[in-house]
Amino acid sequence: MAVKVLLDTDIGSDIDDAVCLAYLLAQPECELLGITTVAGEPEKRAMIASALCRSVGRTVPIYPGVDAPLLIPQRQPVAQQADALPRWDHDRAFPQGQAVEFLRQTIRACPHEVVLLTIGPLTNVGLLFALHREIPRLLKALVMMGGAYTGGLSGRRRFERREWNMSLDPHAAAIVFQAPVPSLRAVGLDVTTQVTMDAAEVRRKFQTQRLRPVLDFAEVWFQRVDHITFHDPLAAAAIFDPPICRFEKGAVEVELASERLLGLTHWTPGGPDAPHEVALEVDAGRFFEHYFSALGNADLGRG
């Protein structure tokens, strides 16, 4: 039976969101119920998501979400990859101010069946959980790309170990980690940085029908960065092939007391009743085989 998935994304900044969405659209075990966007220029982010959906003939509900963090200034105001939008067919009008309500209605309509996948700052989800206190318990699971939990980044100073999604809206992240979600799995920066690919190899591999649009948006990314780190696709793949990552139970707290360390994640290992699970290891070879197999098989299916 297909897994019902809601995707909350800041697509349009780091290219890995688009790489993740392409995977979800190709994954035969994924029933993508809808997409909400978050961070600056959420409408442009929705347009990018629409372009990727249209490029493979899929109609998916897309809702632009909140454009600013709950309490701190916006640090991600622009969706840079929107520069490539003129080359791709996409929707231009979306429901306004309804993203949180769309998430609420969709989860309530399918109690204990929906996996909420978050791959951006947690503003939309934090508001959802704060306004509708029953919703966390109605999820099947929440899977996120966010935080850093092990010693993999120990060479950096503490404030440099803050992961981007957590630091963009730490107060929303704290709400999410405190919510009574039946299963909350976090794939952190210390693990995702082990699955990377340089631009030259990306250009070679992203020649399939489903990945060519992603490559076009990636060329905007490559103007600043010479590789892709598969942060978000790794979190998504772990839903459908759990052994890709080794998870361990524990408890996560988000730093709010220190302004300099806002968004730093503190993880304490725990027993079977601990509220969270964090990824400690990744099988990089298994991940890449899984990812490109899903995309390749989907292209074959379209033939």
Image: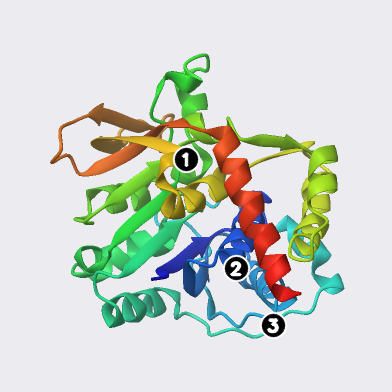
Q: Nearer the viewer, residue 274 or 12?
A: 274
**For numbered disc 2, what is the local secondary structure?**
helix
**For numbered disc 1, what is the local secondary structure?**
helix
Q: CA distance from mark 3 to mark 2?
A: 17 Å
In the rendered image, the vertical position of residue 131 relative to residue 239, given as above or below: below
- Per the image, the residue denoted by label 2 is 25
- Per the image, the residue denoted by label 3 is 91
Quarter holding residue 224? top right
* Amino acid type, residue under disc 3 in the picture: Asp
Q: Residues within 10 Å of mark 1 (few under 14, many from 20)?
A: many
Mark closest to the chain's N terminus, 1 or 2: 2
State left or right for residue 38 relative to residue 82.
left
Residue 244, numbered label: 1
Residue 181 at what x, y percent from top left? Answer: 23, 56
- Camera-nearest label, 3 or 1: 1
Do residues under tags 1 and 2 come within 8 Å of each other at their CB atoms?
A: no
Mark closest to the chain's N terminus, 3 or 2: 2
Res. 293 visible in picture: yes
Q: Quadrant of the C terminus?
A: bottom right
In the rendered image, the vertical position of residue 128 relative to residue 93, given as above or below: above
* Amino acid type, residue under disc 2 in the picture: Leu
> Residue visible at 56% across and 50% down?
233
